[in-house]
Image (cartoon, helix red, strand yellow):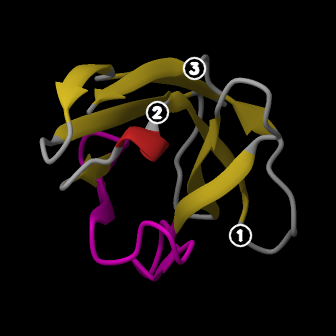
Amino acid sequence: VQLQASGGGLVQAGGSLRLSCAASGRTFNSYRMGWFRQAPGKEREFVASIKWSTGNTYYTDSVRGRFTISRDNAKNTGYLQMNNLKPEDTAVYFCAAGLSTVPRYDYWGQGTQVTVSS
């Protein structure tokens, strides 16, 4: 599985960005896709995930209600819509994938920088 993340950028607080993660290499129906982020000097943290077959979603508390994870089956692409961005959302965002039956992510895309100015 290869993952290609895109969509990061610089935005003012309160603004929006949409990240994309294009997956290739195999069909994705047995996988889940997740988004993680890592701010300078901090550990990588879970942001959101989606089970590809059912569309079930999960969010960390700090983004629930502001971020929406989704997927497009036809394009084998996942998305993270980020609204009402805050300076504390500034980080490198990574998409990842793993079999939905296994509690880990085995495939990682390159990061995309999100910077939110106050």
Q: On the image, numbered disc 2 is attached to which residue?
A: 90
Quick one: label 1 or label 2, which is nearer the N terminus?
A: 2
Q: Which residue is mark 3?
A: 111
Total marks drawn? 3
Span colored in magenta: 50-79
Marks 3/2: CA–CA distance: 13 Å
Residue at 49% across / 68% down in the picture?
Answer: 50
**Residue 23, relative to residue 47: is it above or below?**
above
Task: Give the Cα separation between the discs numbered 1 and 2.
Answer: 28 Å
Residue at 27% from the left image edge and 66% from the top image edge: 66
Q: Which of the labelled discs sits on residue 61, or is there none?
A: none
Secondary structure of the residue carrying tag 3 is loop
Q: Amino acid at mark 2?
A: Thr
Q: Residues within 10 Å of mark 3 (few under 14, many from 20)?
A: some
Q: Amino acid at mark 1?
A: Ser
Quadrant showing the N terminus: top right
Q: Nearer the viewer, mark 3 or mark 1?
A: 3
Mark 3–mark 1 CB contact (< 8 Å): no
The mark closer to the camera, 1 or 2, is 2
Q: Does residue 65 belong to the magenta stretch?
A: yes
